[in-house]
Amino acid sequence: MTDMTRTATTTTDTGTPVLDASGVTMRFGGLTAVRDVDLTVNAGEIVGLIGPNGAGKTTFFNCLTGLYVPTEGKVSYKGTVLPPKPHLVTQAGIARTFQNIRLFANMTVLENVLVGRHTRTKEGLWSALLRLPGYKKAENASRARCMEILEFIGLQDKADHLARNLPYGDQRKLEIARALASDPGLLLLDEPTAGMNPQETRVTEELIFAIRDQGIAVLVIEHDMRFIFNLCDRVTVLVQGEKLVEGTAEVVQGDERVVAAYLGTPFEGAPGADEVAEVEAAEAEAGTSTTKTTTTEEEDTR
Ligand SMILES: Nc1ncnc2c1ncn2[C@@H]1O[C@H](COP(=O)(O)OP(=O)(O)OP(=O)(O)O)[C@@H](O)[C@H]1O
Ligand SMILES: [Mg+2]
């Protein structure tokens, strides 16, 4: 409840649009992974994007960041239509993390953040190769900024550790640090707490509030509903590539279609229903406690 109060007091719905995606459609051959999706994120907002596995959330992120060229639709950042090229999108001010962690495993923590910084350094190739004074100065400034970001994230003591030696939760944090190094105005997070324990999730929640308080708008995909509803000013629900509903945590939680599609009882004959039943039966047989949790959730949603 305390968390809900906090979300309510920090809601800033009235900001100007930072991200404005309209009519975004992405087809892969005969499969329409994202269909005609509109989504805005305003300055000062944390917006959640939820939906069942395969709903098209990551595909939508890929369309926003130029990794995919949408079949239809356009994406604007602060009023300017973005070309679908990842480096131009980053340069414009959108940074992201990936569902599957993408770090340079054999580089140090600081080096990984420096890589994220490169779009903001103006020194050219020759300057770097010849180690001209301008390059040295720029490099020192980059290092100082990246150390600042590591302090903000809480990884400053591990700056010299190899990324691959970090615990999983720290690797996720490092991905966020690397994204922040490009000085974004909008941060896209694809399942930032996947695989984290409740304590780490809580820390990440605080971190995202702190990022927003620094003037960076956030769009976040997550399956952890408690995390999403504590954190987000607005939540958009994607189901089978289409936007089902959008609104505050209360609106989304109270929408029966969302409950049916995502939070509780699956649609009759919905894709995956057989698999769910199969897993539940196997778990019941193995005597795990998951069955109990599932039953409770079903009861809650009735
Ligand atoms: N490059 C691709 N080529 C063909 N199909 C794809 C491609 N990328 C995604 N898809 C398909 O698009 C649909 C949406 O996938 P996507 O990864 O966007 O879902 P998601 O909502 O992020 O799911 P999850 O919660 O499991 O991460 C899926 O059916 C997926 O198989
Ligand atoms: Mg995904």
Image: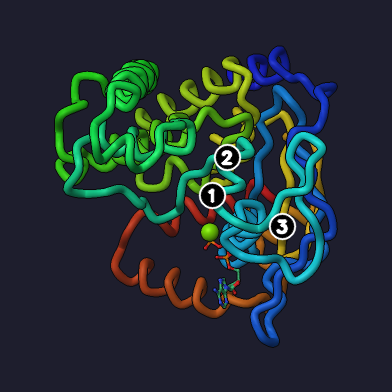
Q: Decide which of tag 1 and tag 3 comes sooner along the chain.
A: 1
Amino acid tagged 1: His
Q: Vertically, is 101 above or below 34?
A: above
Q: CA distance from mark 3 to mark 2?
A: 28 Å
* Residue for badge 1: 87
Q: Nearer the viewer, mark 3 or mark 2?
A: 2
Counting from the top left corner in percent of width and height, residue 174 is at 34, 35
Q: Please tell me which residue lies in front, 182 or 294.
A: 182
> What separation in Å lies between label 1 and label 3 (alpha carbons)?
27 Å
From where the camera sits, is residue 154 visible?
A: no
The residue to which callout 2 is attached is 91
Query: Which of labels 1 and 3 is toward the front?
Result: 1
Q: Measuring 70% from the left and 27% from the top, which residue is drawn there?
A: 45
- Residue type for callout 2: Gln
For the point 52% across and 43% down, the residue is 96
Residue 11 drawn above or below residue 177: above
Tell me where residue 193 sits by quadrant: top left
Q: Is mark 1 within 8 Å of ligand 1?
A: no
Q: Is residue 20 left or right of residue 55?
A: right
Question: Which quadrant, please, contains the N terminus?
Answer: top right
Q: Residues within 10 Å of mark 2 (few under 14, many from 20)?
A: some
Q: Position of residue 188 (x, y in %)?
A: 57, 42
Q: Quadrant of ligand 1?
A: bottom right
Residue at point 60%, 29% (across, down): 231
The type of residue carrying mark 3 is Leu
Residue identified by numbered label 3: 238
Tag 1: Cα neighbours inside 10 Å, few (<14), some, or many (≥20)? Answer: some
- Dot 2 and dot 1 residues touching (CB under 8 Å): yes
- Which of these two is toward me, 247 or 73? 73
